[in-house]
Amino acid sequence: MAILEFSTPPSNGPASKKLKVTLATIAIAISLTLGSTLAASINLNNQENYEFGQGIVLTTTCSDGDTLTVTPTSNYENSSGEFKLSAITFSHIPDSCRGVQFKISIYSDNALLDLDTGVQIARVLYSGSSTNTIYKGASGSDTFGAEISSASVAGGYGTFTILLTGNPSASLDIQKITLESSCQGVGTVESFPGVSGYQIHNCNPGLPSDLYWIQNANINGGVPIRVYVDMERDGGGWTLILANNNLNGWDGTNALNLNSTLPPANPSELSANYSIIGFADYIKKSPSGFQYRIEAATPGDWGGVWTANASYSFTSQTNTNTNITLDTKFGNWSYDGDGIEKRMPYYTPGAQGIITTSENPDGAWWGTLVARKNSGPWRPAPWHYPGGGGWPGVIWYWVR
């Protein structure tokens, strides 16, 4: 546990008091702080917002050595004639902290104080610019009157502010603020969703392959959904975005989103086709440098693992996304017109090959993951010829 202390300079009001910021750990260790800067003089008689300090700089393991800044703010209250904690801003949060739960409390010398009316522990699940809800208590999904404002991301770093709208504690009573960060258990229950299979795996590497909960404002209207995550193969943390074993039913309108809230409990035993390709851009671990995996017939066959070396989209409708690296090959095949071509799968809603790697989705369209219904005898799409044939039986598509 690392403790930060800084003092507000003396002024016309009571003597300055030290404010301690304590960083506890649950699953993500927080290292020694890098330092803090102090505010200039503070006039306690004015009625302007003021900050306890110019910010507290700290490093967490989720930040990969980057720094995160916590800035508490106080506001003068006419009715009580005192300054009260009014807001806490978290800034310079790297994208690697998405899905981490921040737990915030404030203390006097040795006792918890109310952060807001009747609330001593507040929790925020950091979701980048989608960070929008603050919970109360050490667990659960109950909310209170505090608000999240100014959630934004720029240049790979995020910020958000907690606005305390009830009756928070007086600033002079606060001697420390604790920030606990954790992602232990993330994704295992609906009330604590993750952001991707990759993040859930990193937080809990011992979890088995199974269904897990994720949440993003751009997915399912912001309501958490379950996804299937492969936690074991090829490094683990792979979110299933397509499982296709049936040609009939596919068309240009449903290939990106089909049975999206009904993921298969076992991808090898499909009862229906499934696609969340339209959500994949919000699940991948980074804008570029993310990985995708394709396999057919049986897991680990007729496909491979690729890295996208540019900011490609899973819903792209261009066949020029060719800056990709084959990390691992499954089976004996070569890039050519009789199978996978060297480009990330793209979306062609009006063609025979709806999700395909083929340069010409209406010509030699081998290397196709989703084919239009009634387009031929394929089961489920023309994949590799002659090895994989048009009849691999099932094709899977994954992201991390």
Image (tube, rainbow, N blue to C red):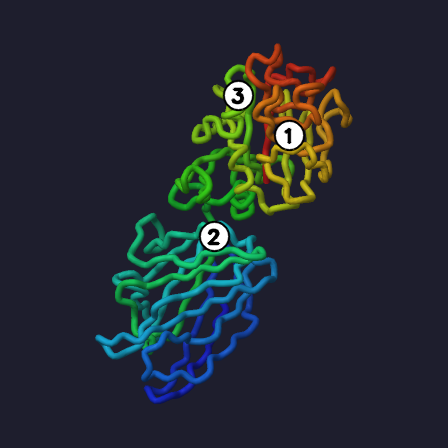
Q: Residue at x 40, y 69 (%)?
A: 177
Q: Along the horizontal axis of the image, is 373 left or right of 293?
A: left
Q: Along the horizontal axis of the image, is 239 left or right of 179?
A: right
Q: Amino acid at mark 3?
A: Asp
Residue 22: assigned label: none
Q: Residue at x 52, y 28 (%)?
A: 275
Pair 1/3: label in front: 3
Residue 129: assigned label: 2
Question: What residue is shown with label 1?
Answer: 294
Instruction: Name the secondary structure under disc 3.
Output: loop
Q: Nearer the viewer, residue 258 or 229?
A: 258
Instruction: Name the secondary structure under disc 2.
Output: helix
Q: Residue at x 67, y 41 (%)?
A: 308
Q: Residue furthest left?
A: 79
172, above or below 148, in the image: below
Q: If you read the primary sequence from the N terminus, does the residue marked by circle 3 or circle 2 appear first?
A: 2
228, above or below 16, in the image: above
Q: Residue furthest bottom?
A: 12
